[in-house]
Amino acid sequence: MISEIEQYKTNLYIYFNALGGLTTSGFAVLQLLRGDYATGIISSMGFVYFSIIVYTLLIHKKYLWKGRGFVLFIPMVILNVTNLHPEFGIYWAYVGVLSFFLVLELKDACIGVSIFLGAIFYVVSLHFPLPVQLRIYASLFLVAIFSFLLSYFINRLLNQVTVLVTRDSLTHAYNRHTFNASMKRALYTAIRYKTPASLFIFDLDFFKKVNDNYGHQAGDKVLKIVSSTIQNRLRDSDRLFRYGGEEFAILLNQTNEEVAIKLAEELRLLVESQDYGIDRTVTISGGVSAARASDQVSSWIERCDKALYEAKSSGRNNVILSHPL
């Protein structure tokens, strides 16, 4: 689902930039035929830019410069046309305002529109009487506000959907679906670029007794405290996943086995030291393993699982570094 959301965003950028390329190419031809070579050349450069953007989105799945190169072409062309031909050029200003929100991220769009409106208002003041100026100002401002609100709510909706499909609703750790995709990416990166990555899988010791003796609400509280305690300690590049039930996994990017086992031990002590509102100590047992060049995702996880079972069978409340299979 998360990949589908990302693909949806990519497709939107492809469509809008392709439309920008078609528009600038046609506009360039029109202006060159009319003898407005400056506008024609800028529009032609815009066509080249949009073509490059579409190519990088299609082939490399990358939004080059986050679309910011757009401001060098479309707004400049609109300002120039409005100054040279104000009687019809001003209508393109409305398209310009909308296009900021279509091809840029929201923050960049707001900054760009503010600057663009200031420039277009100045040009308008040079060519139109005051009553007409006020109508143009008001209508452009309303278009900007409505475009902002539409973009804001679409982004907010997509962000909420992303959270729903990637996070566990109880613990706010990443969910099992995200774990599978993240493991594939981490292993690919580790093997291709020969960078370390480690996995720490653990579960809560005797968690069933917590649910049986204190109720499921107390059990849920324990899970949430464990999750928040660990997430507060991890780096931004690390990811905590709820692997299943009371079992969790931590993907440690750019981390070798030696560092990973030290961190795992630190997390074990942190979990043990927390107050869970019940009259018993909560502990964890876990296994740690680093990615290897010969690994598949399944073999990497299998080593961690074996180390986890070894930690449980040796008395629990400990973490163990995996041995080669």
Image (tube, grey):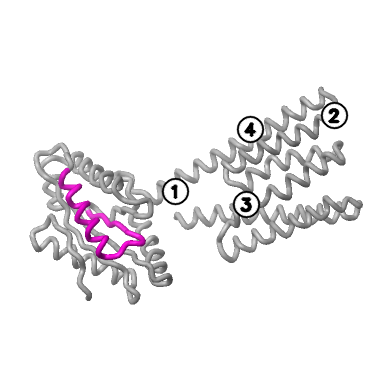
The residue carrying pointer 2 sits among few (fewer than 14), some (14 to 19) or many (20 or more) residues within 10 Å by Cα, namely some
Q: Residues within 10 Å of mark 4 (few under 14, many from 20)?
A: some
Judge depth for marks 4 and 3 and give the one in front: 3
How far apart, in angstroms, are the residues tagged by discs 3 and 2? Answer: 33 Å
First of labels 4, 1 by sequence position = 4
Q: Which residue is mark 2?
A: 128
Q: Is residue 295 magenta?
A: no
Q: Is the residue 70 above or below the residue 146 in the image?
A: below
Where does label 1 land, which residue?
A: 162
Q: Position of residue 195 (x, y in %)?
A: 38, 67
Q: How many marks?
A: 4
Q: Residue at x 65, y 54 (%)?
A: 15
Which residue is at 26% across, 65% downward? 257
Cα distance in 3D space between marks 4 and 3: 21 Å
In this view, the residue in front, 35 or 8, is 35
Q: Identify the secondary structure beneath mark 2.
A: loop
First along the sequence among labels 3 and 1: 3
Q: Position of residue 243 (x, y in %)?
A: 28, 56
- Give how far apart the Cα atoms at labels 2 and 1 are: 47 Å
Q: Is residue 135 above or below residue 151?
A: above
Q: Which mark is residue 67?
A: 3
The answer to if 271 sits in the magenta stretch is yes
Give the structural element (helix, strand or loop) at label 1: helix
Q: Which residues are magenta?
A: 247-273
Q: 10 Å neighbourhood of mark 3: few (<14), some, or many (≥20)?
A: some
Q: Quadrant of residue 8?
A: bottom right
Gap in Å between the C-alphas at discs 4 and 1? Answer: 26 Å
Mark 4 belongs to which amino acid? Ile
